Each structure stands twice: as structure tokens, then as C-alpha cells.
Amino acid sequence: MPDFSSSVVYQIYPRSFADTTATGTGDLPGVIGKLDYLADLGVDYVWLTPVFPSPGIDNGYDVADYCAIDPQFGTLDDLDRLIAAGRERGIGVILDMVFNHTSTSHPWFRRALAGDPTYLDYYHFVEGSPTKPPTNWQSKFGDLRGSMCPS
């Protein structure tokens, strides 16, 4: 793994970075289009917040499929082009992948919820009630109790 202590890492939230499709949402081709500018700034790595398919409840960190690109951001080919174009300019690409976060629509979560013993090992389910939640965890998105799992 590289030593990032002397590297310039530029974090990009693709949704608002550069929109090439006039949809109001930034995309991977938009990032590609700004690589020369980033190289001129001396950027060594771009760090992309999640661009994977997601219901978007947690700003894209609630990933539904780690093996695909959300169509609003482009395609896997666009990601390949970004990596290649970055490499040509000496810029590495870091994908923000938080594997302990999955969406409630992720197939593994759905299979665990359905009782599949293989996938039950991937999650820790704790019973709660409206008066006694399973944890005291707080969310910046408000009280999500009850919205994550069907009753």
C-alpha cells in the first residue's frame, strides 16, 4: 500500500462534482473531464465517494451492489476509462468502499432477512420494539427504527 503521508488526495463527491449529461447529477465522465485540472493542482489520488448502486438513504454508503456502477454516475467502462486516464496523468483512483455497510436492498441482506443460514452469519440482528430499540445508536438521518426491516 502506498504511503499517503506525502500525497495529495482530493476527495470527490461525484454527484455534485461535474455533470456531463445535463441531468443535474455529476458523473464519472465529468471526473474524467477534470483530470487535467486536478493534475495541474498536484493531485496524486482522487478519492471517490461511493458510485455503486444504492437506494441513497445514506449518501450512497448503503450499497446495494459492490460489483456495478450506479447508472446515474456512468458505467463500469467509464470507471475503467477514469482509472486509465488518471494513470496517464499520474493520478491514482481510490474507491470509497465500506464493506460493513450494505443496503437493506443488498441481496445478502435480503437473504439473511429471509433466514438463509449462510447470510445470517454476515449480519447481527437484534430484536427491538417501539419502546425499546435494539441499540442506542443515533443517526444523522433521523430515527430510522422500523424503516430498515419489514415488520
Image: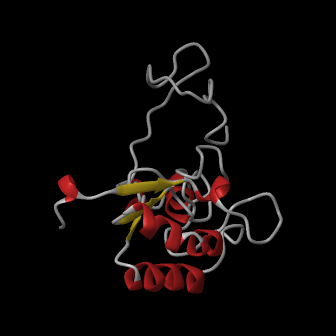
Instruction: Please state which of residues 51 and 99 is positioned toward the viewer in this rendering.
Output: 51
| Coloring applied to the structure | secondary structure
| Viewer-closest of 80 and 139 | 80
50 lies above or below 33: above
Q: Please tell me which residue is depicted at 57% across the width and 61% down the height of the picture.
A: 64
The outermost residue toward the front is 40
Q: Quadrant of the N terminus?
A: bottom left
> Between 71 and 125, which is closer to the camera in this rendering?
71
Residue at image point 43% right, 78% down? 86
Q: Position of residue 149 (x, y in %)?
A: 62, 41
Q: How many marks?
A: 0
**Foreground: 60 or 95?**
95
Residue 117 screen position, x and y as percent: 40, 60
149 left or right, relative to 87:
right
Position of residue 73 relative to residue 88, above or below, is above
| Quadrant of image for the C terminus | top right
Is 86 rendered above or below residue 11? Answer: below
What residue sits 61% from the left and 40% below the top? 148
Residue 59 location, x and y as percent? 60, 46
Q: Is residue 45 above or below residue 13?
A: below
**Which residue is drawn at the image coordinates 50% and 75% (left, top)?**
67
